[in-house]
Image (cartoon, coloured by chain):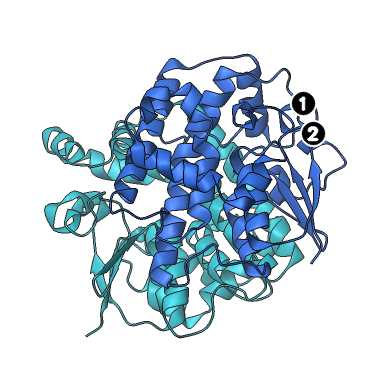
Chain colours: A blue, B cyan
Amino acid sequence: MTGILYHGQPNGPSFTVLAAAFEKGVDLDLRAIDLVAGERHSTALPHPIEVDQSIEGEGPVLVVDGVAMTDSVFLACYLDEVGSGPAIRPADPYARWQMMAWCRYVIERVAPAAAALGNAATPPPAVPAGIASADLDARWAQAVEAKVDEAQLADSRSKIFQAVEKIEAQLADGRDWLMGDFSIADLETHAWLAGMRAIVPDAFAAAPLTDAWEARLRARPAVAQALGLATVPEPEAIWAIGPEINRWG
Amino acid sequence: MTDVTLYHWEPNANSGKPMLALFEKGVAFDSHYLDLLNFDQHKPDYLAVNPLGTIPAMTHGKLVLTESTAIMEYVDEAFDGPRLMPADPIDQWRTRWWMKFMDQWLAPSFSMIGWSVFVGPSVRQKDPAELEAAIDRIPMPERRVAWRKAINGAFSPEEMTESQRRVALGIGYLEQALGERQWLASDEYGLADINGFNLAYAMPLSQPQLCNDELTPHIMRWLRAIYARPATRACWALGRTDLARRISLLESEPA
């Protein structure tokens, strides 16, 4: 299989997809783009609805057979289907439901909080030209102008605390990985939380199981390979615009 | 007797997704109707099943499942019957992409409008003290905020305008996608269509200026084709309110 993966620094959704590709041994043409400079909106990339209206915001784009695909968890599911490496999803339907429900929690609750905190910590320099989605454009403008809604940031910090508590509870039975066996849930959870240690350190102050889990994760060859693609010392400090915070609260 | 129980409200939005998936798979299930407008989902009996108090939930033997879209994937994988997730990996990706787009972007806009014109006014007639007590029993803080907004009619004009903007755009995206292929995510009927139908079946009635035979012929073709399926008829027969009866609009002939 041949495919082109346009990706940013190995943080957030780009991390998930790069690591999943390496875990599964899928050979892709990797093309690094600067997501924070808005290169995802350039005419060099295809722009179907699924790219321009991706819920994930500035995530990676995988092009296979002329189809441009987005949204990191679903890209990882795709790579699991087509790759030859060991499965990164449980085979049992109920265990698979647990993994998909966990990932839904991460993409809906944790990712928007992490991106908002990351953008507030290091606002992007300018709103790029060519953004098709008006709501994504508005999130860019808000981040660039550093229009910080304190209540929203406080809520985002509490979401990071809750996520770490949830991981501690999940690992409490002594398991190595969130779903028992290693899975996409480990990648996607790490993708959004790695950069939160510097921004919300208190959330990790008493989380020994999370610490050990992250160390195990980073020791995996595929994860190390993904992180090795970074062109900056701390890729987890690089934040492009993420998913929007749920409009219903 | 069956070992599957579905706790649901009307065949509509989130409740309707696993209902219709179960009917399409031919899986027998015990239907446990919860009256959302009577806050049945926040009462002790149901919280014993789903402590978060969200609808729907499904039990399969001793297993408990929540999150309607994830339940649909489970139903497709755990039971015999026609395959509802396409076989091709790219079509699988497209199925999940559309379900997420609808679940997290389009449906919340529809439901903000729906809650302000239907749910809010329906429950507002209750005794205020009783209503306040009912809201206090909601386990998730996010849902308490949403219910207070719906009941007080407190969605801001900006929020409503934004929701209407998204509804108009979303209808355009659906029309475009359904112009490219017969079904939403692949050439076969599947989970994306089941998800989408629950969102869209009443669009010709609720958004007649945006969704009609002239402007959105592909959407209308798609809705009528899904309405014609025996599983859809059986599923919507479980509805008890005018909400579900809106589906009869699809009996009309193309203009």
**Disc 1, SS:** loop
* Rendered residue at 47%/42% (across/down): A214
Left or right: A234, with B8 as reference point: right
Q: Amino acid at mark 2?
A: Glu
Residue A155 x/y as whole percent:
39, 26
Pointers 2 and 1 in contact (C-beta within 8 Å): yes
Residue B205 x/y as whole percent:
51, 55
Furthest toward the right, the residue is A44
Task: Say which of marks 2 and 1 sits in front.
Answer: 2
Of the numbered discs 2 and 1, the one sitting upstream in the chain is 2
Q: Amino acid at mark 1?
A: Pro
| Classed neighbour count for the residue bearing mark 2: other residues with Cα under 10 Å, few (<14), some (14–19), many (≥20) | some
Residue at mark 2: A39
| Classed neighbour count for the residue bearing mark 1: other residues with Cα under 10 Å, few (<14), some (14–19), many (≥20) | some
Residue at mark 1: A128
Left or right: B110, with A8 as reference point: left
Q: Nearer the viewer, residue A188 or B14?
A: A188
Q: Tell me the subunit letter for badge 1.
A: A
Q: Tell me the subunit letter for badge 2.
A: A
Instruction: Note whether residue B245 is visible.
Output: no
The image shows residue B43, relative to residue A141, as above or below, that is below
